[in-house]
């Protein structure tokens, strides 16, 4: 198995892409730590499913935007597992709106979870990983962080920020044996895109060379690659999983 006995933390693990990532990593031998904030029932159900299938999983609650809660989460990891091999920074929120109509509360929430939350977990994970001079950090960006999109100024800004942090952290942490990469999904079939209007989804599909919406497993497979030894010489990269978005 590609991740036999690796300790992997997946933030925002209880649904969507995070859920699929967690199942795939566990199916490849990893001990998966499922982080959640408000969906305790869904997280525990996922852990039970993974265990029933012969995998290893445990849950831990933390709001990634809270430094105190992230600190407690990493204390739990140190106590229970003594190390961390892989961090998948997947937790994120999406609140689309035109820039001139975006309330300050939405701006603050998106920045706190998507950007600050990614940084909080990346910083704490790096401290653990540097002790053994190895580790893999995978940050969830978005194709919007590369190309932008009307109605997603704040969201796109956070995801562009994630890409920038990924590139800088890769240079900073590389000498410590830690790789840092980002995954930039396009239109993926999750609860997040349910809020998009049908005509907008149709336009996005038409702008995709493969002419279909991606599935969470498409993203999870790239995360598995970046989590495994197959990617040992890959760092500072942003890998698009968008079916070749042509516009």
Image (spheres, rainbow, N blue to C red):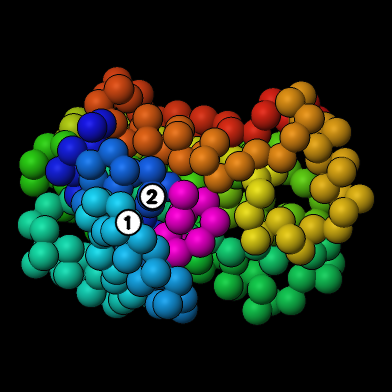
Q: Nearer the viewer, residue 27 or 218?
A: 27
The 10 Å Cα crowd at callout 2, few under 14, some 14 to 19, many 20 or more, is: many
Residue where numbered disc 1 is placed: 50
Q: What secondary structure is found at the residue carrying circle 1? A: helix
Residue bounds of the magenta highlight: 12-20
Q: Is residue 107 visible?
A: yes
Q: Are marks 1 and 2 in contact (CB under 8 Å)?
A: yes
Looking at the image, which residue sits at the far right?
199
Identified at 58% across, 64% down, the residue is 93
Q: Position of residue 128 (x, y in %)?
A: 16, 52
Identified at 66% across, 73% down, the residue is 106
Q: Nearer the viewer, residue 214 or 160?
A: 214
Left or right, residue 120 beside residue 210: left
Left or right, residue 235 beside residue 73: right
Mark number, residue 179 = none
Q: Nearer the viewer, residue 216 or 150?
A: 216
Identified at 38% across, 51% down, the residue is 22
Q: What secondary structure is found at the residue carrying circle 2? A: helix
Identified at 33% across, 75% down, the residue is 61
Q: Position of residue 57 (x, y in %)?
A: 26, 59
Residue where numbered disc 2 is placed: 23
Q: How many marks?
A: 2
Q: Earlier in the sequence, mark 1 or mark 2?
A: 2
Q: Position of residue 210 (x, y in %)?
A: 74, 26
Q: Is residue 62 visible?
A: no
Q: Position of residue 1 (x, y in %)?
A: 23, 32
């Amino acid at each position: 198995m590609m991740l036999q006995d690796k300790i992997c933390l997946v933030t925002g693990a209880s649904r969507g892409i995070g859920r699929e990532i967690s199942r795939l990593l566990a199916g490849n031998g990893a001990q998966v730590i499922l982080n959640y904030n408000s969906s305790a029932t869904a997280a525990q159900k996922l852990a039970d499913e993974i265990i029933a299938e012969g995998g290893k999983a445990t849950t831990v609650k933390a709001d990634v935007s809270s430094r105190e809660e992230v600190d407690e989460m990493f204390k739990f990891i140190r106590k229970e597992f003594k190390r961390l091999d892989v961090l998948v920074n997947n937790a994120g929120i999406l609140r689309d709106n035109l820039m001139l109509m975006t309330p300050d509360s939405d701006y603050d929430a998106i920045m706190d979870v998507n950007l600050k939350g990614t940084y909080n977990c990346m910083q704490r994970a790096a401290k653990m990983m540097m002790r053994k001079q190895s580790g893999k950090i995978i940050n969830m960006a978005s194709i919007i962080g590369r190309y932008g999109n009307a109605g997603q100024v704040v969201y796109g800004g956070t995801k562009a920020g994630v890409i920038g942090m990924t590139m800088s952290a890769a240079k900073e942490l590389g000498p410590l044996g830690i790789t840092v990469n980002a995954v930039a999904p396009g239109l993926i079939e999750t609860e997040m895109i349910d809020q998009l209007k049908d005509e907008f989804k149709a336009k996005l599909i038409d702008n995709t060379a493969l002419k279909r919406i991606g599935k969470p497993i498409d993203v999870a497979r790239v995360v598995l690659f970046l989590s495994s030894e197959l990617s040992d010489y890959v760092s500072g990269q942003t890998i698009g999983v968008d079916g070749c978005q042509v516009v």
